[in-house]
Image (cartoon, coloured by chain):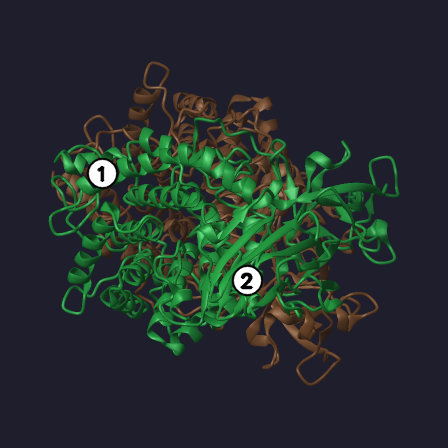
Chain colours: A brown, B green
């Protein structure tokens, strides 16, 4: 039975070789409308083709042809890591073909794979930037060459193919590339490691799907090699940037480049799971805990610094300069999912939901053809529009852009959205757990027959989730529902009647038989969220959340005369739901001009300036102002925005 | 008379060709002990030699020999702009020789000049990175090649020489270089401009000292050429980074790379002064005003971002990630000095004092052999020490370092400290104005005889300034004293008795005759400073200043069990002076652990966490804690530090 639930060819991105818990395959949950299905549709219809057009136009696919044609002497377009965009796109195509089976997707993928395969060297090495005529030699720039990083993404693409259509040309290419890596970097090879973790993830998962413990062992070697200062610093980027400062097993917190830190953590969790290394798993859990407590934004976003795309220090969480790279959000979901599978702890699923709705979903435009790279929580000035054909050099600016100079996020989103439903539920022996809520049908082949659940909900706009049992095995199976950590006052109505259920796991008490119905009610009324007082950058501020959605104020919604920098939130008046957002009471206040004898250094004064409503009024005017879900910001046009709103002070609302 | 006060060979760095006001020469004020004389001594005894050792050891001087020996084919150490370090050092040596006349200084300088001169091409071009065998061609990378930037510093060094010893070899080298620039970039030449402004400053001042209006005209051309998008963006660095986004005349605020913006503003002020272009001067004044109101730190520091060493947006002033590059502080002083000379507005002298004490003075260690590059207002964790021989790749980290990968600050400090007294006073017709206070003797040759003032003070530790008239012309001259903007309650006692004097200018009412005495009393009691409520990053926080000094809390001074992230300031209890700092009342408070059902996302909660004093006490323990002058932080060893302290809330000191 346990073996059954861990079938290695199930269409999942992550299938640990040990442990009682498995995620569900792409085909086990079919969404029927709703939030994520809309995003998946836009991804399939538009984003995949959009990415393909861009990598083609920029010559990043042709780089493979240059290698296969021996024409590598001339200039090569793209960054050293541009191969990885082709692989992430191939992975997205593979999952998408597995999801809906549309022919054009397969055709495009096979054509890509032909060009990729043709560029593979005889010994399995595959990279378009190193190792050929006119190029630098293989593995001569492990710090920034990204060769193993690219290979890791190739392996992940092959995993998607193997788990959806079975072994094929891409899988063979990946197998040869993985064998090459094991020879080159194995115990008898060079003791190197890649500046950007990713190969660990790819090797571990390919090892699972191909039943090759050598690959897992090589992933383990890479994990253990890290943290000993092997990589040479690059200008301002030190060992911590690469997570090469402290051994993975000893580190207390994630630091340095956020995507690197998180990919490493995900690969480490894979190695820990498959080798039963509880010490290693404990290390990742400990790092997750400290990072989530002290280095993570309300949105789930990670990475406080632009300079190194990195984590800041504890409590360093500026909303305006938040980097919160889309890829770091995706990577955080990858880590939490692995930790959930390994431990079953509800906290990991909670953070996944937060990050999926407020980082991952925030990035793409509704048409799937423009993206946020950075996801700040405060945009001071409305951005100029990015044109549809302009590569955006800046990972910032408050505008979704069609492509970036370093364009890791669009293809990363594509592969993530194509597999969203894999995160929706898990199976552990006779227990099925619903983790994320969306309308659709869950169909699981269990011992004794299929369990089929029809889920009806408008979540997250509405907190009612109805679960009808359409079919069930003729033996007892259990259903468990995740009650999100914010859902105080949730209720569950099942065959045993209605009762309150606390955040955490809510087990259904009735037997699952065809026709039985469960109603979960999650209160998604808007609520205030206050930051830890050690987060200096948002002291005195409050955010409003609604269900899993972080809300924000956009300048577009303010009265015309107001500036976003002047608003104050009346927290004595609770926010009320409206549409998918909320309405709150706000005023705009401005400091009175300094008295004449205070001149000299205007922004700093000896006494707190009196705040007033405008040039005419001495009392601020309070108004109802809508807040919208953060993921939707700047969709109606460019806009200034803030998540954290300064609170009007108690008893002196006008003086806040 | 006006001509006399503007003598072009006076030992000043800035001598506008027009306008009624002049600064004083190096030899006109001799400090006698005190704050700045200590820094000048350390600069002369240690910093000059320290910089010389480093540029020698790194091969940056030998780059000139490689050119003169035709040996430029091999690798060249240093950045493209390393020549400028040699020129800034030469400028510092020239001023220092002008200040005290020590032979070794002149010997070192002459030896440097010989090597510089030998590298000059026949047509006046002088650069060790471009234009010779094996190098890129001249002016093929105006965006980042820094050729004209280096030339500008060469010209400034020559100005120092011309104004201290008169025309010499260095001045001739500079003249030929300037002529080359005028030919190459003049109206008939290429319409290019340098990515890093500086040539404008150098040309304008060399034009003044050599009476060459062509140089001023060329500076004007460079100023007017800027802002039209000529420079190509470099990766993430856009036109605003170079100030090439908006014409100088139209810009409302400084933006982009802070040092570039400020050097450009200084050069623009020079051009505006000498050409009588009031529109251009108005533009710089307007930019100063908006930048000081919205983009400047309490310390006077400028530049909020590490990524581009740049200004952030209005109100974007994070204390922890403040960049506040030492060179930007120096450049701000340069701009304000020019605006003061042009307008006589006291605000410029006020900001200069703030920046000199809290940015410029903060950088060097007392021994003058280690420096801060960035000057943040909040250091969360105490840094590891930088070794004495280690180049610090990071312009951050809370530790003074002997040298940097980009090492612009040490030599910039050296030339600035060597000329500090030039900013101490100004002369305008019959009126002498004291701008900065330090013990020493001011000796000015005025019509009718010398005015000699002996100044006795322990400023800034003490606010008493005694001014004795030692000698005076036998005709009426006027003395004016600057009362800093913070000095409410200042008094002036002179022949006309004692009276209160308001911030701004305080004219002495008595006739200056030998033997007469004036006593200025500036209240330097510690005071609270509150930020504009639009500066989000320090909302709810207060700083303490004392006279011109910004104070800070260092973790070294906290009770052992306290963490700096937990402190709250009791603002109901006024700070009291102690030593050169203050003592304040603080407590450490920590949020109570979340209730069990609040788990899930610990740093954000639905209600404000209760703050308490420790794991045992429910009430915080209030303690007297010293604050020290910001410029002294991390001098006693590495330390966490913060300038802005969260205020304990009114009526609930323990709940803040």
Front tag of 2 and 1: 1
In this view, the residue in front, A381 or A148, is A381
Secondary structure of the residue carrying numbered label 2: helix
Residue B284 image-quadrant placement: bottom left
Q: Residue at x 23, y 48 (%)?
A: A61
Q: Which mark is residue B315?
A: none
Which sits in the foreground, B427 or B284?
A: B427
Q: Label 2 lies in what chain?
A: B
At 27% from the left and 35% from the top, the residue drawn is B111
Residue A170 place in picture, x, y as percent: 29, 38
Q: Which residue is mark 2?
A: B349
Quarter-of-image position of residue B75: top left
User: Which of the two residues, B449 or B23, is positioned nearer the viewer here?
Assistant: B449
The residue at the far top in this view is A188
Q: Residue at x 12, y 52 (%)?
A: B123
Q: Residue at x 49, y 62 (%)?
A: B449
Residue A47 lies, with reference to residue A178, above or below; the image says below
- The span from disc 2 to disc 1 (Cα, nearest Å) is 38 Å
Question: Is B211 above or below relative to B558?
Answer: below
Q: Secondary structure at mark 1?
A: helix
Q: How many marks?
A: 2
The N terminus of chain A: image quadrant: top right
Residue B213, position in %: x, y? 25, 68
Determine which residue is flagged by label 1.
B114
């Amino acid at each position: 039975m346990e073996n059954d639930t861990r079938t290695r060819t199930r269409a999942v991105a992550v299938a640990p070789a040990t442990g009682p818990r498995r995620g569900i395959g792409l085909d086990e949950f079919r969404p029927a409308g709703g939030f994520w299905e809309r995003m998946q549709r836009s991804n399939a219809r538009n984003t995949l083709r959009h990415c393909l057009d861009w990598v083609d136009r920029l010559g990043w696919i042709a780089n493979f042809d240059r290698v296969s044609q021996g024409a590598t002497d001339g200039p090569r377009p793209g960054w050293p890591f541009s191969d990885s965009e082709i692989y992430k796109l191939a992975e997205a195509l593979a999952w998408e073909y597995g999801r809906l089976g549309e022919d054009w997707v397969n055709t495009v993928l096979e054509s890509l794979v032909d060009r990729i395969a043709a560029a593979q060297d005889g010994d399995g090495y595959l990279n378009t930037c190193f190792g050929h005529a006119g190029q630098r030699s293989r593995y001569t720039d492990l710090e920034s060459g990204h060769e193993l990083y690219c290979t890791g993404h190739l392996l992940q693409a092959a995993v998607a193919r193997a788990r959806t259509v079975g072994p094929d040309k891409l899988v063979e290419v990946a197998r040869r590339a993985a064998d090459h890596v094991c020879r080159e970097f194995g115990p008898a090879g060079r003791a190197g490691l890649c500046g950007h973790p990713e190969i660990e993830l790819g090797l571990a998962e390919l090892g699972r799907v191909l039943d090759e413990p050598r690959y897992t062992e090589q992933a383990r070697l890479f994990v253990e090699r890290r943290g000993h200062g092997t990589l040479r610093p690059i200008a301002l980027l030190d060992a911590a940037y690469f997570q090469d400062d402290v051994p993975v097993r000893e580190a207390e917190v994630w630091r340095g480049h956020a995507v690197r830190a998180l990919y490493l953590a995900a690969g480490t969790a894979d190695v820990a799971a498959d080798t039963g290394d509880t010490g290693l798993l404990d290390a990742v859990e400990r790092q997750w805990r400290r990072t989530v407590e002290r280095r993570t934004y309300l949105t789930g976003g990670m990475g406080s610094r632009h300079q190194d795309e990195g984590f800041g220090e504890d409590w360093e969480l500026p909303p305006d300069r938040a980097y919160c790279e889309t890829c770091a959000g995706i990577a955080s979901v990858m880590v939490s999912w692995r930790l959930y599978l390994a431990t079953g702890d509800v906290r990991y699923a909670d953070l996944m939901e937060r990050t999926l709705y407020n980082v991952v979903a925030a990035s793409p435009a509704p048409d799937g053809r423009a993206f946020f790279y950075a996801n700040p929580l405060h945009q001071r000035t409305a951005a100029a529009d990015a044109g549809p054909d302009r590569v955006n050099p800046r990972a910032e600016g408050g505008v979704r852009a069609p492509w970036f100079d370093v364009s890791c996020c669009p293809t990363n989103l594509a592969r993530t959205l194509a597999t969203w439903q894999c995160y929706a539920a898990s199976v552990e022996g006779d227990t099925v757990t619903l983790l994320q809520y969306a309308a659709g049908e869950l169909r699981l082949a269990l011992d004794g027959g299929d369990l089929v659940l029809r889920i009806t909900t408008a979540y997250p706009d509405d907190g009612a989730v109805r679960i009808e049992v359409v079919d069930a095995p003729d033996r007892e199976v259990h259903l468990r529902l995740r009650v999100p950590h914010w859902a105080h006052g949730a209720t569950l109505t099942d065959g045993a009647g209605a009762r309150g259920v606390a955040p955490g796991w809510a087990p259904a008490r009735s037997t699952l038989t065809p026709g039985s119905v469960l109603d979960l009610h999650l209160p998604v009324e808007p609520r205030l969220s206050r930051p830890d007082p050690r987060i200096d950058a948002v002291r005195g501020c409050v955010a409003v959340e609604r269900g899993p959605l972080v809300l924000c104020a956009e300048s577009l919604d303010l009265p015309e005369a107001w500036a976003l920098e002047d608003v104050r939130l009346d927290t004595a008046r609770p926010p009320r739901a409206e549409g998918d957002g909320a309405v709150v009471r706000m005023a705009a206040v401005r400091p009175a001009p300094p008295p004449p004898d205070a001149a000299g250094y205007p922004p700093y004064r000896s006494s707190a300036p009196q705040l007033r409503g405008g040039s005419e009024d001495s009392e601020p005017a309070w108004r109802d102002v809508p807040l919208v879900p953060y993921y939707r910001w700047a969709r109606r046009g460019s806009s200034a925005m803030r998540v954290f709103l300064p609170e009007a002070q108690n008893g002196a609302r006008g003086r806040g």
